[in-house]
Amino acid sequence: MFPHLIASLVLFVLGLMTPSLAGAETPRVEDAMKERVRACTACHGREGVATNQGYFPRIAGKPAVYLYNQLSHFREGRRQNPAMRHL
């Protein structure tokens, strides 16, 4: 097949899909921040000062950029913790 024919076919198929995608509703989250920190509260507690389930660092009061950097380090493997790796 010719490249322009393939491109036209792809655009045609996408055009057929567009109406169905436009009608699909995206689920809404009422409080995005509340949902984001839900994973943190299991170990670090609701107030960010840990739970009695073991040692977890205090995250309450830490600057946002510090927390962001720490999460990035876990993701990139520069900081190791099995529980935090997947988050």
Image (spheres, grey):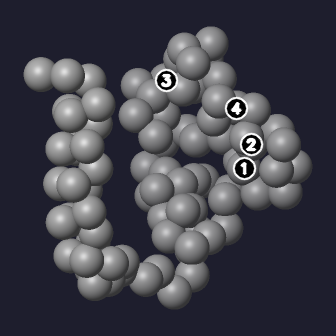
The structure residue drawn at horizontal position 51% and vertical position 86%, both measured from the top left corner, is 30
Give the amino acid type for the residue marked by disc 4 in the picture: Gln
**Cβ atoms at labels 2 and 4 below 8 Å apart:** yes
Q: Is residue 51 visible?
A: no
Instruction: Give amino acid for label 3.
Output: Asn
Q: Nearer the viewer, mark 3 or mark 4?
A: 4
Tell me where residue 51 appears, x and y as whole percent: 53, 56
The amino acid at mark 1 is Ile
Q: Where residue 84 sits: x, y (%)?
A: 48, 34
Q: Residue at x 53, y 55 (%)?
A: 40
Mark whose residue sits in front, 2 or 1: 2
Residue nearer the viewer, 11 or 2? 2
Mark 3, mark 2: which one is toward the viewer? 2
Q: Which residue is mark 1?
A: 59
Of 9 and 23, the residue lying toward us: 9
**Total tally of numbered discs in the picture:** 4
Secondary structure of the residue carrying numbered label 2:
helix
- Tell me, yes or no, whether the two marked residues, 3 and 1, touch with CB atoms within 8 Å: no
- In the figure, is residue 75 to the left or right of 49? left
The residue beneath circle 3 is 81
* 29 over 72 or under it: above or below: below
Three-letter code, disc 2: Leu
Q: Which residue is mark 4?
A: 70
Q: Earlier in the sequence, mark 3 or mark 2?
A: 2
Q: Which residue is mark 2?
A: 67
